[in-house]
Image (cartoon, rainbow, N blue to C red):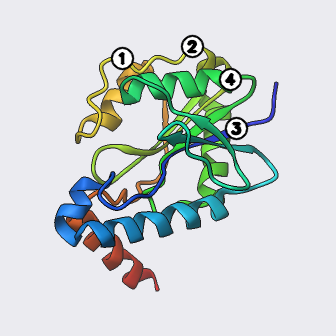
Amino acid sequence: MGRPTLIVFARAPAIGVGKSRLARDVGAVEAWRLYRGWRAGLLRRVIDPRWNVVVRMEPDEAVIAGFACEPQGNGGLGERLERAIRAHARGPVAVIGTDVPDLGAVHVAKAFVAAGRSGAAIGPAADGGFWILALSARRARSVTLDGVRWSTFHAGGDTVRALGGAVETLETLIDVDDGASLKAWLSSRRRRG
């Protein structure tokens, strides 16, 4: 079995590109500033000698210094995720995005352990999506994400169904996509801090 791989789906930060729901609530410049900071912080926090980190970028030609970058390529989110997972299925694979400010190496490690036990693990996001999908090498080689309603409250549940229901569930984290989720995350941070 190969070494685990963490795949980070990321976008090159640009004002007015991406985070459109957040930008509607806080403005394009603030959304860009937040995303840029979250992406940089997340990439620092998830580096760990226990796994490889690969960043799948959009646009395809974008790069981040110091990281192995690959293009996301064409197609819907499900197709791009399947392609990325299968490309690194020599060992366990986990996929994350960059808009979960509390996500760190400890979360990734727990996901890999859970996937080792049950073949698949998902970290639900408060908005109905997920913040991590981790798969054993065997499950990663044959992953299909058909029928997932991406960017909806149903995405997490649909993903579990697409994987045949045999998925271990991790803790719920806040995925910041709009002003309401930003407010919820800031509130949870104040309570913790």
- The front one of 12 and 155 is 12
Give the side of residue 42 with respect to residue 2, left or right: left
Image position of 89 (left or right of 166): right
Decide: is 43 above or below 111: below
Does dot 3 land on a helix, a strand or a loop? strand
Q: CA distance from mark 3 to mark 2?
A: 16 Å
C-alpha separation, residue under disc 2 versus residue under disc 1: 12 Å
Residue 146: numbered disc? 1
Q: Amino acid at mark 2?
A: Ser
- At label 1, the amino acid type is Asp
Q: CA distance from mark 1 to mark 3?
A: 23 Å
Query: Counting residues from the N terminus, which is met first, the one under dot 2 or under dot 4?
Result: 4
**Farthest left residue in view:** 24
| 180 relative to 61, above or below | below
Q: Is residue 73 visible?
A: yes
User: Around disc 1, counting alpha carbons within 10 Å, would you say few (fewer than 14), some (14 to 19), or many (20 or more)?
Assistant: some
- Mark toward the start of the polypeptide (4 vs 1): 4
